[in-house]
Image (cartoon, rainbow, N blue to C red):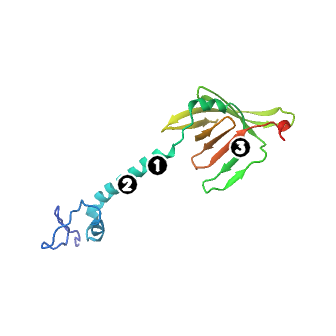
């Protein structure tokens, strides 16, 4: 069986002519392509790994710094209490789904960053039909962003709180789908 591995010495590249200057295997930049064309480039894989890991690390730090630029204030969370309906859903590709009328709306009740959410069905006379399912809510402060953690009977999920105001708020899920809510106006009071 033939051994095709070539022994190399530190500071010398396998197959190089002793009369020519040796390449530094730790130098990246314009000599980086030289490493890829050498006959025994597997020796340099750990150095390539470190080089790319540094690039990935700096990219992740940049994303973390940019991802939560405008953080809602703690006082804004009092606006969550009340009846809310979905106004529109914006998908990651930019397409929107606008809701003219919602058959079911959400009731939020929060105190000291904990509370519940329940689906109710509005009626023409101003009353609501309720279901018996209440989802527990908790607002979590993480990475300079606020998240709404929802726990139902058989599942739980976390949504990023993008914005909160008196009349509207926006949540974003893990799939980067944004749910824009608006304050519910009873049917009898609509124009």
| Label 1: which secondary element | helix
Viewer-side residue, 38 vs 147? 147
Viewer-side residue, 188 vs 124? 188
Say which mark, if any, is on residue 55. 2
Residue 125 pos. (x, y %): 87, 34
Say which mark, if any, is on residue 81. none
Say which mark, if any, is on residue 63. 1
Q: CA distance from mark 1 to mark 2?
A: 12 Å
Which badge, 1 or 2, comes first in the chain's sequence? 2
Task: Mark yes or no: residue 155 visible.
Answer: no
Circles 1 and 2, Cβ within 8 Å, touching? The answer is no
| Horizontal side, residue 34 vs residue 165: left or right | left
Relative vertical location of residue 90 with respect to residue 161 in this rendering, above or below: below
Relative vertical location of residue 130 with respect to residue 32 in this rendering, above or below: above
Relative vertical location of residue 191 with respect to residue 95 in this rendering, above or below: above
Q: CA distance from mark 3 to mark 1?
A: 29 Å
Q: Residues within 10 Å of mark 1 (few under 14, many from 20)?
A: few
Residue 156 pos. (x, y %): 59, 39
Which badge, 3 or 2, comes first in the chain's sequence? 2
Q: CA distance from mark 3 to mark 2?
A: 40 Å
Residue at image x 58%, y 49%?
176
Q: Which residue is mark 3?
A: 86
Q: Residues within 10 Å of mark 2 (few under 14, many from 20)?
A: few
Which badge, 3 or 1, comes first in the chain's sequence? 1
Residue at image x 74%, y 39%?
105
| Label 2: which secondary element | helix
Image quarter where the N terminus lies is bottom left
Q: Residues within 10 Å of mark 3 (few under 14, many from 20)?
A: many
């Amino acid at each position: 069986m033939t051994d095709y591995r070539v022994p190399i010495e530190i500071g010398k590249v396998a197959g190089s002519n002793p009369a020519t200057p040796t390449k530094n295997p730790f130098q990246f930049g314009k000599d980086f392509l030289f490493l890829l064309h050498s006959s025994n480039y597997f020796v340099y894989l750990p150095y390539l790994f470190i080089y790319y890991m540094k690039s990935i690390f700096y990219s992740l730090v940049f994303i973390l710094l940019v991802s939560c630029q405008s953080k809602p204030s703690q006082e804004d969370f009092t606006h969550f209490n009340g009846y809310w309906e979905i106004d529109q859903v914006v998908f990651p590709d930019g397409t929107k789904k606008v809701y003219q009328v919602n058959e079911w709306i959400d009731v939020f009740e929060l105190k000291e960053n904990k509370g519940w959410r329940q689906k109710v069905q509005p009626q023409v006379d101003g009353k609501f039909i309720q279901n018996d399912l209440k989802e527990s809510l908790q607002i979590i402060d993480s990475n300079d962003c606020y998240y709404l953690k929802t726990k139902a009977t058989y599942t739980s999920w976390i949504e990023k709180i993008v914005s909160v105001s008196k009349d509207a708020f926006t949540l974003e899920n893990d799939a980067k789908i944004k749910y824009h809510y608006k304050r519910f106006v009873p049917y009898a009071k609509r124009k």
